[in-house]
Image: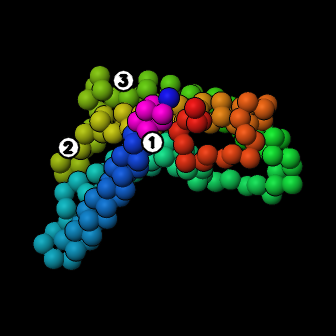
Amino acid sequence: MKRANQALESLAEWLALAGGFVVFILMVMVAVDALGRKTLGALPGALEFSEALMVPAVFLPLMFVQMMREHVFVGVVTAGLPIRTQAFLDGLAAVVGILIFSLLTWLALMKALDAFAVREYRVAIIAVPIWPFRWMIPLGTGLMVLQLVLMATHEFSRAFGTADPLLEESGLALPPG
């Protein structure tokens, strides 16, 4: 169990780093394009590539952000509730997330398959392939589903007494075991 936890944590960290690297590439590309417009000329396909690169920048880090519990969270209503009740509500929220992100994963997978079949691309000064970027959405949302399943399992075990209710373990992909 510990090895699986370490593997998932490593995967999430690498994907988050990849997402950060994509943001860096976007910054450099936009800066070169902006400078080029004033001097030598615009960077061909910069707009289209920047649109496509936003996809991995957003979807690759999803699992890591959920693992660290850094998504938008409002605890005003639940802060005064007992720990086990909070854990139950967190588990319930994870189940709702599982349903929503499973649907997103399925729909994105169907779109990625269609895009792959026709080798989808954007027409610009140069042809910009879009189909590889379509695969980042089901990858990111699918891993988010995995993390939400692990989180729901852990939160329900905290809520119903099989785990220490005070033990948060927010940085772990899997509950300790």
Kindly state the secondary structure of the residue where label 2 is placed.
loop
Point out the frontmost of discs 1 and 2. 1
* Few, some or many residues within 10 Å of mark 1 (<14, 14–19, 20+): some
Residue 128 horizontal/vertical position (percent): 23, 44
Residue visible at 53% across and 31% down in the picture: 146
Q: Where, by quadrant of the figure, is residue 154 drawn?
A: top right
Q: Check disc 2 and report the residue beneath it.
A: 127
Q: CA distance from mark 1 to mark 2?
A: 36 Å
**Residue 170 drawn above or below residue 135:** below
Q: In what quadrant of the picture does the C terminus appear?
A: top right
Q: CA distance from mark 1 to mark 3?
A: 28 Å
* Few, some or many residues within 10 Å of mark 3 (<14, 14–19, 20+): some
**Residue 146 drawn above or below residue 74:** above
Residue visible at 28% across and 59% down in the picture: 25
- Residue 151 visible, this orientation: yes
Q: Is residue 123 left or right of residue 155?
A: left
Q: Check disc 3 and report the residue beneath it.
A: 113
In the image, what residue type sits under mark 1?
A: Glu
- Magenta segment boundaries in residue numbering: 2-9
Q: Where, by quadrant of the figure, is residue 79 drawn?
A: bottom right
Kindly state the secondary structure of the residue where label 1 is placed.
helix
- In the rendered structure, which disc, 1 or 3, sits on the residue that comes first in sequence? 1
In the image, what residue type sits under mark 2?
A: Ala
Q: Main secondary structure of the magenta part?
A: helix
Residue visible at 31% across and 34% down in the picture: 131
Point out the frontmost of discs 2 and 3. 3
Point out the frontmost of discs 1 and 3. 1
Does the magenta run of residues contain 82? no
Residue 76 horizontal/vertical position (percent): 80, 57
